[in-house]
Image (cartoon, grey):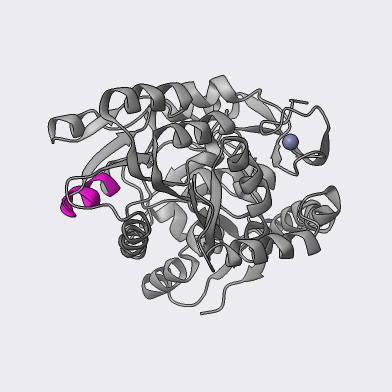
Amino acid sequence: MVQCRNCRSAGLSLLYDFGRLPLGGYLLPTAALARQAPTFANALAICGACGLVQQASDSAREALVELVYSNYQPTYSMSAAVRAYQESLLDTAVRLSGVQSGDAVIEIGSNDGYVLGLLKHRSLAPVGFDPSIDPALARSGYRIFREYFGAASARRYAGAHGTVKLVISRHTLEHAFEPVDFVEGIAAVLAPEGVAVLEVPYLQLQMMNNQFQSMGVQHVCFFTLGSLSDMFGRVGLRVRDAWFCQMDGGSVVVCAGTRPPAGADGGRAAQIESVEQILRLHEPAGFGQFFAEVARQRTEIRGLTAQFAGTGRRIVAYGAGGKGQALLNLLGLDTQLIPYVIDDTPGYMGKYVPGVGTEVVARDDPRAGEAGMVLITAPTHIREIVERDRETRGRDRLYVATVPRFHIVDV
Ligand SMILES: [Zn+2]
């Protein structure tokens, strides 16, 4: 087991071993290659000293860089709901930081540059850090750095261009192999009065929403507010406020800075941390029930699927993104049980899911049309998927999903 990625303690305790699983987030050109895809230890552990939940091993690190992060597929800016959410989060971040026209704002994990565009539209000077950022963005006048963000890159930036009043980052810190180096970078690049607004999946909400398919090796750390505060504290950052949002199966947004919270600020964060203590999220006791339920579902869902397939009716999955791929592999739903997975992303069709080797097909593919049951593996938009499918297929199909629990979808 690794040393704690936050406090360097050697005292990690195993919470749950998912077994060896392939990476999610990429597809392969043939079924044979997909079935031979490399697999990696996927087990979660908790630090007895600081309470950070994290991957117990680092074995997938190089493969993630090579197979997944080198050709990252931008997806998150697609839906109108997410776009509206990003605008409202920016409103909040701008208000909390007091940035004004012309001020530089750093975004860590810029993906396709969508948020950089929103910042530019607000007359701010966007700066993007992301190893797989689109290089064409530089030609559009953005200052971009195609590298992992950390203490060294942040100090280089601050030395050349000065500190900034606002750093924003959505769903990036949980992927960082060196999370303390990441937050140290934030501390290094923030002006004394500046704030960082970070959004990450929130462990308790992820558990409440049955998001075990999000616990693959792509996610290195799984945060409570207590463990985040501890990590920030190591680099001189203080959590000033925190609030929850529905993004990505349940997330927390944290506003942090070098100054302590003023007046009533910080009260909400303290309340959340005290609830985490009651739920015992700083120790193994807070997780036993959840992982026992995960183990039970892995047996039960596979059994029910095999039973249905045994009646001669076809089952297809819907959603070939990273989380859908993880679910198929976690539940052992090989092509004997689920021969095809439908996906709407252009470029996915005719490719195969690593591990199970399931072929990705379009929604209107006749092979998908024969299905009597659809397992919706995309954790969001479940209702929209079913409603749209019903418009063309009628009501003769059964739809099942695992979020927020394993259930028959009834719309
Ligand atoms: Zn620790």
Magenta-span inclusion, residue 206:
no
> Residue 290, can we see it?
yes
Q: Position of residue 347 (x, y in %)?
A: 33, 40
Using residue 95 as the reference point, say whether residue 408 is left or right of it.
right
Using residue 253 as the reference point, say whether residue 74 is left or right of it.
left
Which image quadrant is residue 160 in? top left
Q: Position of residue 202 (x, y in %)?
A: 60, 55
Q: Position of residue 65 (x, y in %)?
A: 49, 24
The quadrant the N terminus occupies is top right
Marks counted in the figure total 0
At 65% from the left edge and 27% from the top edge, which residue is drawn? 39
Main SS of residues in magenta = helix
Tell me if residue 57 comes above or below residue 297 in the rendering: above
Which image quadrant is residue 312 in? bottom right
> Residue 252, can we see it?
no
Which image quadrant is residue 236 in? top right
State the residue in front, 373 or 260. Answer: 260
State the residue in front, 30 or 291. Answer: 291
Magenta-span inclusion, residue 119:
yes
Tell me if residue 377 comes above or below residue 409 in the rendering: above
State the residue in front, 364 or 333. Answer: 333
At 51% from the left edge and 48% from the top edge, which residue is drawn? 340
Using residue 246 as the reference point, say whether residue 270 is left or right of it.
right
Tell me where the magenta segment starts and ends, as one range. 115-123
